[in-house]
Amino acid sequence: MFVELNNLLNTTPDRAEQGKLTLLCDAKTDGSFLVHHFLSFYLKANCKVCFVALFQSFSHYNIVGQKLGVNLTVARERGQLVFLEGLKSAVDVFFQTQEEPHPLQFLREANAGNLKPLFEFVREALKPVDSGEARWTYPVLLVDDLSVLLSLGMGAVAALDFIHYCRATVCWELKGNMVILVHDSGDVEDEENDILLNGVSHQSHLILRAEGLATGFCRDVHGQLRILWRRPSQPTAQRDQSLTYQYKIQDRSVSFFAKGMSPAVL
Amino acid sequence: MAAVATCGSGVGTTGSAVATASKSNVTSFQRRGPRASGTNDSGPRLVSIAGTRPSVRNGQLLVSTGLPALDQLLGGGLAIGTVLLIEEDKYNIYSPLLFKCFLAEGIVNGHTLLVASAKEDPANILQELPAPLLDDNSKKEFDEDVYNHKTPESNIKMKIAWRYQLLPKMEIGPVSSRFGHYYDASKRIPQELIEASNWHGFFLPEKISSVLKVEPCSLTPGYIKLLQFIQNIIYEERFDGSNPQKKQRNVLRIGIQNLGSPLWGDDICCAENGSNSHSLTKFLYVLRGLLRTSLSACIITMPTHLIQNKAIIARVTNLSDIVIGLESFIGSERETNPLYKDYHGLIHIRQIPRLNNLICDESDVKDLAFKLKRKLFTIEAEVQKGVSRATFLLDGPRKKLFPCLFQLLEVACIPWLMASSSIFKASNIGLSPSYVTNSGFFSASLFHF
């Protein structure tokens, strides 16, 4: 959890809004630091988190999480975190036939099916347990990242259906939050990815877009972050609020500053 | 389990006696045994395997790519469990050399090799590996007779170090314990080294004839076979850590040549919207899953300049860990450009992963050119014609027999492409006269940003 980013977004783990879909998007740079931020943020907010981690292994997130102050192993044992490790599960699904439907069942299929098994997995993971006492505040679904599903043979429409089903369940029914990471291919004409990105950004309440600098590589400013607040359900009588900051990633935190106000330049 | 073993061996009692001793907890004396390898492997495995070293940044285990200068640009080396993708140059002249250096480094370090190709028999690929340039000490351990006849000087050396004559000629195991070696591309690797090494070959025309046993998914049969072969080797030779009792751990180096070319049965190089356009990306995903759960590192060369659909290249880049692009000047107008007259091509480091970390070791130098001199492959970054070439040549081999270097040099005459923060550096460095004349029309006013 980056304290400066919390200040920019005007939230704290105690009083975060519920029922929101946040889209993380990166163009020409690596936006995974935002995923680590939200993962540690929601774990500290005592939420039940379902993390569909398709991009990296569990130990990667764990080691970075420890730098940010959360322990994923402990959270997983406590039941607070349900972790789907995409890389390891893909190997299991690919080389051995599974009896029960596996969330990544589509890897064995020749034609692009649908993501229903994955949705069932998410729903099962986040459904409220009737144990009487409310241990966790609200459920959160984290997906890193959605563009990998396109590379694995799913169509953009199937991925959008999955997001729609998850939003109906997690955001509307269970009053939880969703955080999705989608890569922006930029000038490379990846139509499927563009469809996916546009579709999710129209449904989202908050868009965080990490971009590389237009002037190229810089050692002191790693990129630019654009924050856009939206109200998808209501007619846009007011303008959506948008802010732009530049950032520099350090070992354990990220520092944000206004454009051109990098400490190296001042 | 490990603690019990150490206590038992020290005290000389059976396991039950140790159990009773621990239950009683009378004495505060606790036997400190050596930390066994049965630790929880949720973190990086910092075992001492030949040819590896931990990264200074995040403790990841690194192996050398075969080119020490490339290791430096990648932040120390190639991390175990990751994929190094090389985008081939147009006529596929320089990328096989990088591929072979990687494999030769594996042989010199005693790693197990897995070579997969659809074009050449892996046995032939191994015959053509470059010979390593070793120090005098390790050279004595094999091939002594050749040097005995050369000069009387070497005879004198042999007399002083007479014990080496008693050692067996062929060294089984890692020839050298250094990290990163230099290779002489004009000489072939000695036959004894190949025979002493453990390698597996996957030649597609041989393997594809047998019947497929897996149900059809959208991967091409060649990729399915290759994945099964790799998984088999990892499982049988215990690279996935499934046998913790095994004392000597080793690294598996996988090399896949020309992945994505039509010889593998894939049509992404032929058609823009082929029938199985997800085949290659699925393959890479499952391959990375296999690598992440085993002690292996993989190098893949891919003819990305032939891929028709640019979106696939972007997806392939995202799915790989390190991506390096080679661009040779052959046949392009840059061949006659006076700026590039010393170099053979440009090398682009397109992506470096952030593993176990928020940041990665990106080098500040972004414009790199390579040069293949007479024989050897090294990498050199040149900032100014006069100054830095001298400093980096010191990194090269001391012998300087045939300094044929695959040199990575920073193109000196395009200063504004460097990092904007290093513009401040440029003003501090005195511009040598040769630099100014070479830059030609690049006036000094460019530095005033």
Image (cartoon, coloured by chain):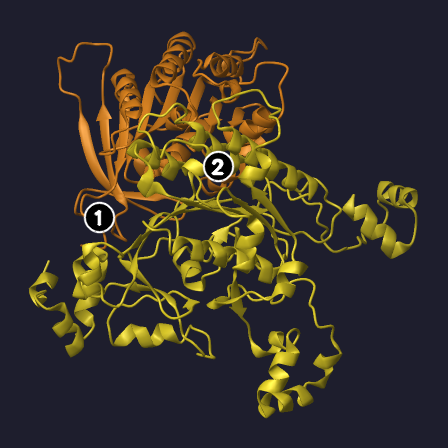
Chain colours: A orange, B yellow
Q: Is residue A35 left or right of residue B46?
A: left
Residue tagged by mark 1?
Answer: A216
Eyeballing the image, is B171 above or below A230?
below
Circle 2 crowding by C-alpha within 10 Å: few under 14, some 14–19, many from 20: many
Give coordinates of residue B324: x percent, y percent.
Answer: 37, 49
Q: Quadrant of residue B392?
A: bottom left
Q: In the rendered structure, which disc, 2 or 1, sits on the residue that comes first in sequence?
A: 2
Q: Is residue B125 left or right of residue B394?
A: right
Instruction: Identify the secondary structure beneath mark 1.
Output: loop
Instruction: Identify the secondary structure beneath mark 2.
Output: helix
Label tally: 2
Eyeballing the image, is A9 above or below B68?
above
Name the mark on residue A61: 2
Q: Label 2 amino acid?
A: Tyr
Where's the N terminus of chain B, which quadrant?
Answer: top right
Where's the C terminus of chain B, which quadrant?
Answer: bottom left
Mark-to-mark CA distance, 2 and 1:
28 Å
Circle 1 crowding by C-alpha within 10 Å: few under 14, some 14–19, many from 20: few
Eyeballing the image, is B37 above or below B421?
above
Give coordinates of residue B204: x percent, y percent.
Answer: 54, 39
Q: Nearer the viewer, residue A173 or B130?
A: B130
Please report the residue visible at 18 percent of the width from the left and 56 percent of the height from the top. Answer: B333
Give coordinates of residue A191: x percent, y percent.
Answer: 27, 24
Residue B424 in sight in this render: no
Please report the residue visible at 61 percent of the width from the left and 55 percent of the height from the top. Answer: B111
Please report the residue visible at 23 percent of the width from the left and 56 percent of the height from the top. Answer: B419
Q: Nearer the viewer, residue A202 or B87?
A: B87
Q: Is residue A161 left or right of residue A28?
A: right
Q: Label 1 amino acid?
A: Gly
